[in-house]
Each structure stands twice: as C-alpha cells, then as structure tokens.
Image (cartoon, helix red, strand yellow):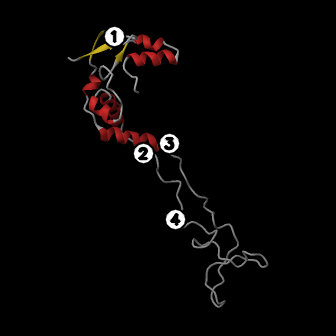
Amino acid sequence: MEKYNIYGLDGKKKGLIDKPKVFLVKYRKDIIQKAFEVSQSKKKQIQGRDKRAGLKNTAEGWGTGHGMSRAPRLKGSGYPTARNVGRVPFAKGGRTTHPIKTEKKIKKRINKKTHKLSIISAISASGDISVVKNRGYKIKNIPEIPLVVDDKIQTIKKTNQIYSILGELGFHEE
C-alpha cells in the first residue's frame, strides 16, 4: 500500500502514514458539479407576485360605440390618468401577463449516496496533482500532494505563526 510522508511544523519529514481509502475513489467531476448546483439552489429565495397586482384600480370596459378601443378605462374626470387604459397587461400599471408563481420548485435535490460520493470524489481530487494544477493552484514548491502535516498545527492560535509554517512547507506563492 502506498504511504504519505508526515511533515512537522518545521517543514521536515517526520514519519509515514498509510494512504487513506478515500484517495482510491475515482474523480467524478460531473457528480461534484451536480452536488454544487444543489447546494447553490438552496440559497435561492422563492419569488412571487401579489394575486391582485395591477388589478387594484377602477378600470371597466366601456364596450362599443364610443369611438375608441374596448380596453378597460380608469374611471374619473379632471385628472391626468382619467380614462387611461388599466388592468390589462399591455397598459401602464396593468397586471403582469404570466407572473412568477410561488409554487415553482427552486430547490434541487440529490440522493444521499450520490451526495456522499460527491464529497469523497472531491477529497480524492484534492490528492490528484493534475486536477490541482488545472484548478490554477501554484504547487511548484510543495513537496507532495496531498500534504500531511503533524497534529500539533491544530494547537497554534496566531495567524502569523500559521503563515510562517505554511511558508516553510512551500506555500509561499499561494
């Protein structure tokens, strides 16, 4: 079985560890993309329009015989919008033709096993050098991918110390 080097906080090899089984899974870009789309769809908010939007006016049709179109006209006289067309979709202030419904399903779903496979596939992709390079990361000075660091790195509290340790491990460009 393949082994990975464990690096200490000083950037030197400290020991060996067996390759986890998660890195043996085949990289599936399509499943990762699908899981990403599902997670993004959950952030969307349902939209809708008021059922009475564009209908809150006094417009009524006059019928024929008035020398103008039969579109519903606003009631009143002596103000600029009197006798203007209202209610219909082609009129200013009229209703929307086919408004967005709140019943529309925006959130996408994914099967549990597919979701697990997408996470495992993404982790295994992080151990593939060609995939990491294609993502645009600068990995010239990094000793190996995936890079395993000693557990003592979890006890560090200061960002400056982490920054210096990552510099010693070859992450200067990143």
Q: CA distance from mark 3 to mark 2?
A: 11 Å
Amino acid at dot 2:
Lys
Amino acid at dot 3:
Lys
Closest to the camera, between mark 3 and mark 2, is: 3
Q: CA distance from mark 1 to mark 4?
A: 66 Å
Residue that label 2 marks: 108
Q: In which image quadrant can residue 151 be found?
A: top left
Task: Describe residue 61's horizontal placement relative to residue 169 as left or right.
Answer: right
Amino acid at dot 1:
Lys
Amino acid at dot 4:
His
Of mark 3 and mark 2, the one earlier in the sequence is 3
Residue in the image at 38% along x and 39% along y: 35
- What secondary structure is found at the residue carrying circle 3? loop
Front residue (pair 47, 112): 47
Q: Residue furthest left?
A: 1
Of mark 3 and mark 1, the one earlier in the sequence is 1
Q: Residue furthest top?
A: 14
Q: CA distance from mark 3 to mark 1?
A: 43 Å
Task: Describe residue 171's horizontal placement relative to residue 83 as left or right.
Answer: left
Residue that label 4 marks: 98
Front residue (pair 95, 9): 9
Residue that label 3 marks: 43
Please say if the residues under marks 1 and 2 sit with CB atoms less than 8 Å apart: no
